[in-house]
Amino acid sequence: MPIEILMPALSPTMTEGKLAKWLKQTGDAVAAGDTIAEIETDKATMEVEAVDEGVLGKQLVAEGTEGVAVNTPIAVLLEEGEDESALANMNDATPAPAAAAAEAPPAAQAEPQSAPAKSPAAPVAAEPEWDGPTASQSVREALRDAMAEEMRRDPTVFLMGEEVAEYQGAYKISQGLLEEFGAKRVIDTPITEQGFAGIGVGAAFYGLRPIVEFMTFNFAMQAIDQIINSAAKTRYMSGGQISSPIVFRGPNGAAARVAAQHSQCYASWYAHIPGLKVVAPWSAADAKGLLKAAIRDPNPVIFLENEVLYGQSFEVPQSDDWIVPIGKAKVVRPGRDVTIVTFSISVGRALEAAEALAQDGIEAEVIDLRSLRPLDSETVIDSVKRTNRLVTVEEGWPTAGIGAELAALMMEHAFDWLDAPVTRVCGADVPMPYAANLERLALPQVADVVAAAKHVCYAD
Amino acid sequence: MATKAAKSSKSKGATAAKKTATKKTAAKRGRSGPDVASTNRDELLELYREMLLIRRFEEKAGQMYGMGLIGGFCHLYVGQEAVVVGMQAAITEGDTVITSYRDHGHMLATGMEAKGVMAELTGRRGGYSRGKGGSMHMFSQDKGFYGGHGIVGAQVPLGTGLAFAHKYKDEAAVCLTYLGDGAVNQGQVYESFNMAALWKLPVVYVIENNKYGMGTSIERASARTDLYHRGQAYGIPGVQVDGMDVLAVREAGRKAVAHARSGKGPQILEMLTYRYRGHSMSDPAKYRAKEEVQKMRQERDPIERLRGALLDSKVTDEASLKEMDRNVKEIVSEAAEFAQNSPEPDVAELFTDIYAEA
Ligand SMILES: Cc1ncc(C[n+]2csc(CCOP(=O)(O)OP(=O)(O)O)c2C)c(N)n1
Ligand SMILES: [Mg+2]
């Protein structure tokens, strides 16, 4: 049967166009790929190419016609062995061109998402109770033990990064790992963050479980495209076929006196991204349990450490199987008057602030978020329903930060329980200065947390 | 002009790069048709059939885009068929393939089904990514195809990582990592070259030099227009190949793959090829003369050249080729039909496949 040639859409926005010129005339032989006409679209002059071969039986739209709607038949092609008589009886036989795609896809009608109600992440298992023996360990040792235990357990786990092997880690986190696991599994990379982050993701696509260490997260900006576009999105884009079980870890946030390019908190950057999990532990026990959970997790996990915490010691359960579930906050100090929510190094400052507040008769509840995505909003909301006040503390900048997110969550889920506006204590909205006095001013201090808590208690 | 400059600087750099066997020889054969004498009949016909399938599939995709059935960006592979078909014939089961967004040809060549690919183009349930990836993002672990990536150059570290995993797992597999003449200027490409050479990873980088990155000709983007020597600084051997001759591609591919598989590290193949259509469906291609495209089609077309050689050498006859053409068309129309009838994804799919269950 003769084939209708339709007015094509030649750009995502084109609805009609001008048939500028016929390049094939009635009776001309047409091969697949031949240009048969020129069309002027909303953007440019384009060529219409034949898909089928045959003889041009008839032009249905005259040269120079404007406003020809997309999908209008513009010509008829006769197939091998057909002649013009075939044109006569085709009107009724030709199916109407498909118009379905012009309609808006129904997917857009999904209701707006509210994070806690519809978190797409799997339900989070509760943290194991621990009444066994503990030992005092630095965060540094806890992280090393977590990696070593997981590498013993699973031969697909390997560590790569700058100075992780022979030098034993720029911050000595990977001490002893090269000796135990060898150069195949503890790999020194060149200084090439985008490259080795991408190699890690590719290896994860194929079923390995890489731990990629960034010397600090400041340098992960070189690699952020691979982290977000390749690691976080591929599972979705592949309809669930390809996962990226990979951990990106390293120190995040302000160190001391290293100025703007080496002192930045990336928590809210990564917490923004669906497809990533983001954790930022404070204690050594959480550092160990969460890193083990991150390595076992089948998704890409951003593991934000803190250089200042590396040397601090905490009690850590004596166990090869100490796992802290991702996505669970922890009440590290109970209290009834005000909730202070924070993570990473600021937990220590918040606890000091709570101590000071107690002197003045204010009992602050301190919550360590530990995970930033998924964010355990339930624990925060429960607390705020009791204290009716919330102060957030982070080293990062205020705009679109973790505190901003918590404030929005309270508006959505705890509005009627609030007795004071949610108050944020953040890093100053400036690049980190070098001078000691200015650096102190740029970072949230215990006194700032105390002042904010008193303010929301109307006690200042 | 640009070629001259490239040649003189090449001879100057020759001592420094003594160990790096970068060659231009394979491209020399030029005009003459593919050398069919060395290959058995069935293989020749299969190569021809696969190229034809890609050509017809892409033409159909272009037509369906024109009908509004395919949205967004749609980058056709018409003209470049010999590259993937030749390379695929040079690898074996267990090897992996990764490329950019101009990926329909690669998927068909790896044996992914036309139906599933076309249904992904239309954003339907029956697509390889169940409608969530589209033209630029499709995958098939079964066929060793790892995408389908929309960020120019990003697939290069990823492919290098697949090769890393092959080596880590002590597999004899090789990863083919494809990139364009535009992508070849991305920094992460050289980060990958360095580590692949340093760690002797089993990867073959296939540069598809189709002379344009969108509207920018290679002369306007690259200081030297030959690309096969881009790995010279890392000691990666490179060869320039007539990418419009499927047998030349296969031959060069076999050597490169054998090299990579034997543990000697990466290889670069620069495929001289050409895309007939615009960069994407909405590109009017005003940056090049029609005559240039016409000349390529008439003189270099990989399908016509093989067809001519098959007929001249009496490997087959017109009638059999016609029959094959009909079969291919049938597959493509079935795919088109399927892609239109497959339903859109369930709205619940909006929130699935973001995280794997721990
Ligand atoms: C990082 C990045 N920059 C820009 C683009 C937009 N873009 C898409 S394709 C393209 C041209 C790439 O050309 P080439 O590598 O030669 O591949 P070809 O399209 O010829 O196959 C550009 C600039 C992109 N997708 N990603
Ligand atoms: Mg190109």
Image: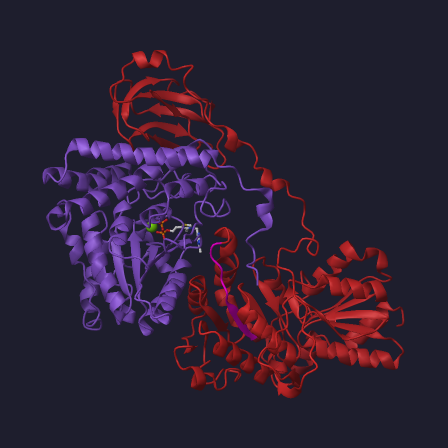
Chain colours: A red, B purple
Q: Position of residue B84 (x, y in %)?
A: 29, 50
With A12 as the anchor, is A140 left or right in this view? right
With A370 as the anchor, is B342 left or right in this view? left
With B80 as the anchor, is A231 left or right in this view? right
Residue A252 lies, with reference to residue B52, above or below; the image says below
Return the residue found at the far bottom: A136
What residue lies at 14% left-to-right and 44% top-to-bottom? B33
Residue A58 lies, with reference to residue A199, above or below; the image says above
Work out which quarter of the rendered image holds the C terminus of chain B and state it: bottom right
Q: How many discs appear?
A: 0
Q: A249 or B25, which is in the foreground?
A: A249
Q: Position of residue A287 (x, y in %)?
A: 61, 77
Q: Do we see residue B62 in this rendering?
A: no
User: What span is in magenta?
Assistant: A241-251
Residue A27 lies, with reference to residue B14, above or below; the image says above
Q: B221 or A322, which is in the foreground?
A: A322
Q: Is residue B73 magenta?
A: no
Q: Position of residue A196 (x, y in %)?
A: 43, 69
